[in-house]
Amino acid sequence: MNRRAFLIFGMCAALSAMSACGISDDTKPRDIPEPEQQDLGGAATPGGGVATGEGRIYLIGPAATGQTPLLQPVARTAETASELLNSLLSGPNDAEVGQQFRTAIPTGTRLHAATVQAATLRVDMTEQLLQLSGSDLVDALAQIVFTSSELDGVQQVKVLVNGAEQQWPTGNGTLQSAPLTVYDFPGRVPSAQPAYPAVPTPTDGG
């Protein structure tokens, strides 16, 4: 066999081997076995959403030893009041849980509607909120009010349960039926005021 014939024979053998190893085209549609199926849509993020965007929700942050945990804002992507509140109801994401963020709002709480009337946001939620009492209820309400107040034009929040108005406790425990504002929950977020030095004690002859 001359060199030219040998090269042609080798090329044919290689092409034949590649055809044998390749995946043949289906001549008609067929079901793909479940173990071989892949999720082309991507996995859903468990818990809260990704901490990006210009919206902010308020979660209960980690507390130092002996201190009361405060509300802290985290980023969320939301363009409407409903989207922002649904992000709040989803709670912290995995990374935030790892940083000891949490929510006082009960699991399973759903939003019926969020509508703005003048400067008041009316937030209608399911009855799980009524399961809370004491400081847990105040924390949950503060989360809703501070998150809602991040929306442009919202100055106060009316929280309803299944369309019915309620009396809610403020930060000092007083019940009120009027719309809630961030000023009803003083001391629930870190202060923006700098720590002032102690006043020096006067000395004799000073």
Image (cartoon, rainbow, N blue to C red):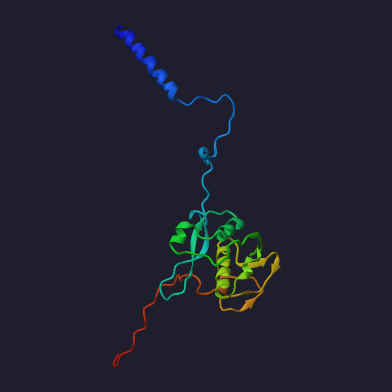
On screen, residue 185 versus residue 21, left or right, reads: right
In the rendering, at what x and y percent does residue 186 appear?
52, 74
In the rendering, at what x and y percent does residue 153 appear?
60, 62
Q: Residue at x 61, y 62 (%)?
A: 109
Q: Residue at x 47, y 66 (%)?
A: 61
Q: Residue at x 67, y 71 (%)?
A: 166
Compared to residue 30, the image places residue 62 above or below, namely below
Q: Residue at x 60, y 58 (%)?
A: 81
Between residue 8 and residue 114, name the one nearer to us: 8
On screen, residue 157 versus residue 53, left or right, reads: right
Compared to residue 138, the image places residue 4 above or below, namely above
Compared to residue 11, the image places residue 124 above or below, namely below
Between residue 27 and residue 114, name the one nearer to us: 27
In the rendering, at what x and y percent does residue 192 appear?
45, 70
On screen, residue 202 versus residue 163, left or right, reads: left
Name the image quarter holding the N terminus. top left
In the rendering, at what x and y percent does residue 125 appear?
65, 63
